[in-house]
Amino acid sequence: MSTIIEGNFVNCDAPYAIVVGRFNSFVTESLLEGALDTLKRHGVTDDNITVVRIPGAYEMPLIAQRLATSGKYAAIIAIGAVIRGGTPHFDYVAGECSKGLATVSLQTNIPIAFGVLTVDSIEQAIERAGTKAGNKGADAAL
């Protein structure tokens, strides 16, 4: 018989940090609401949730590193929205954000859930922030 290892949300008494970018706030606020709702539905109280608002996705790795090394949080949820435009800016921001968050998680042994949308259009972002494609902020909180 195969051994199956599956993560479960079991520590509702632990402190969690949510880092949320203000850029594209019309999307990130909905993602944040989804994450907060999911945490609370699993028994996490407001006292165990810290929301840190930052400018955007590019700043996330540094802030996540500060939070992870503080020793105060069991896990971090990163929430943002990077929408492709007509310049290479998207590639730099999305790449550095994802690579930076992965590096921080590996170096600190603190889980960082990736709830940063990297999409081609505003429509795709809206779909993933609570309409057709669910709420990726809620998914990240699981």
Image: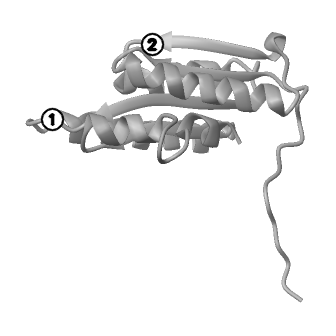
* Furthest-bottom residue in this view: 1
* Furthest-front residue in this view: 132
Q: Where residue 26 sits: x, y (%)?
A: 39, 19
Q: Nearer the viewer, residue 114 or 27?
A: 27
- Is 101 above or below relative to 27? below
Q: Where residue 111 sits: x, y (%)?
A: 67, 40
Residue designated by label 1: 85
Q: Residues within 10 Å of mark 1 (few under 14, many from 20)?
A: few
Q: Disc 2 and disc 1: Cα gap in Å?
A: 21 Å
Residue designated by label 2: 54
> By what rule are the colours in the image chosen?
one colour
Of tags 2 and 1, the one toward the viewer is: 1
Q: Residues within 10 Å of mark 2 (few under 14, many from 20)?
A: some
* Residue 96 picture quarter: top left
Horizontally, residue 46 falls left or right of residue 29, namely right
Work out which quarter of the rendered image holds the N terminus and state it: bottom right
User: What's under tag 2, amino acid-wise?
Assistant: Ile
Q: Residue at x 28, y 34 (%)?
A: 122
Q: Where residue 19 sits: x, y (%)?
A: 55, 21
Q: Residue at x 54, y 44 (%)?
A: 134
